[in-house]
């Protein structure tokens, strides 16, 4: 990759220009939680005054008053972003990642490539946090969709996720005072924050970028729940500064 200023945004090239989804009036469903408990093999997303349904079993939503429709990819940007998160998460899951989702963003941790730690019971899983966004191309006026991917690690003690404070407390109950802090230092070296000598790692950003691009490369081609194919650019987006 040539030098320059980059952001960890990976552009998504979405096949075709239309989504085939189901649609219903939002007013008919005061609670999407109740609706989601009733449907199987389909998902729903609310936007303004409409609810959109999709998934391999989306046709069954007709029994709830949904009707089939086609949308342009850029017509409901929030829906497109939602579909991208679902599709990318499923692709990472197929690649051996454990997925944790929230309303704002999702995380994925690689179960197939754990990082070894010298103390028994302590494990470190490499992973990423991802969310979607869209930008408007100033030349064409078109919307451009992509995934923002950040490096994340999951630290576990005896199989249970912990933070550094919890790890220090629990290890301190089992070992002498020096060893827990040595374990934390070892972990920070392996996460790229510190050098092997304990100093600040000036190459931390490069370390994280290499891992981020490796995650994207393992799931750079996938399908959306609507069936549309997606290809992610395998390089981050260049930022061009005006003089």
Image (cartoon, rainbow, N blue to C red):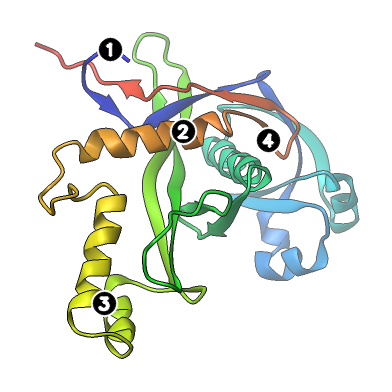
Q: Nearer the viewer, residue 189 or 24?
A: 189
Residue 184 vertical position relative to residue 55 in the rendered view, above or below: below
Q: Residue at x 27, y 68 (%)?
A: 183
Instruction: Find residue 135 and report its horizontal and vertical position in percent.
Output: 39, 27
Task: Identify the residue position indicated by label 3 in the image.
Answer: 165
Of tags 3 and 4, which is closer to the observer? 3
Label 1 sits on residue: 2
Q: CB atoms at circles 2 and 3 under 8 Å apart?
A: no
User: Residue 187's quadrant in the figure?
Assistant: bottom left
Q: Which residue is mark 4?
A: 224
Locate the N terminus and report the quarter of the image it occupies.
top left
Q: Secondary structure at mark 1?
A: loop
- Please tell me which residue is depicted at 57% across the width and 55% down the height of the picture: 99
Q: Which residue is mark 2?
A: 214
Name which of mark 3 and mark 4 comes first in the sequence. Answer: 3
Q: For residue 171, which quarter of the picture?
A: bottom left
Tell me the CA gap for discs 4 and 2. Answer: 21 Å
Foreground mark, 4 or 1, reads 1
Disc 3, SS: helix
């Amino acid at each position: 990759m040539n030098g320059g200023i980059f952001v960890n945004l990976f552009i998504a090239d979405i096949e075709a220009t239309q989504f085939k989804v189901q649609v219903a009036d939002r007013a008919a469903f005061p609670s999407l939680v109740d609706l989601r408990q009733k449907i199987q093999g389909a998902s729903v997303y609310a936007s303004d005054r409409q609810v959109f349904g999709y998934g391999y079993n989306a046709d069954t939503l007709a029994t709830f008053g949904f009707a089939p429709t086609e949308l342009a990819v850029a017509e409901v940007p929030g829906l497109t972003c939602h579909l991208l998160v679902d599709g990318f998460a499923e692709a990472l899951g197929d690649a051996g990642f454990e997925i944790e989702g929230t309303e704002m963003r999702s995380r994925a941790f690689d179960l197939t490539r754990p990082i070894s730690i010298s103390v028994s019971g302590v494990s470190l899983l490499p992973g990423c946090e991802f969310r979607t966004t869209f930008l408007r191309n100033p030349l064409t006026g078109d919307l451009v969709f992509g995934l923002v991917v950040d490096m994340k690690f999951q630290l576990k003690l005896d199989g249970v996720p912990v933070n550094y404070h919890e790890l220090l407390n629990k290890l301190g109950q089992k070992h002498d005072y020096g060893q827990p802090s040595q374990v934390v230092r070892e972990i920070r070296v392996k996460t790229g924050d510190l050098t092997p000598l304990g100093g600040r790692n000036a190459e931390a950003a490069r370390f994280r970028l290499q891992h981020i691009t490796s995650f994207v490369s393992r799931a750079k081609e996938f399908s959306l729940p609507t069936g549309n194919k997606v290809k992610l650019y395998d390089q981050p987006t260049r930022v061009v500064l005006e003089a």
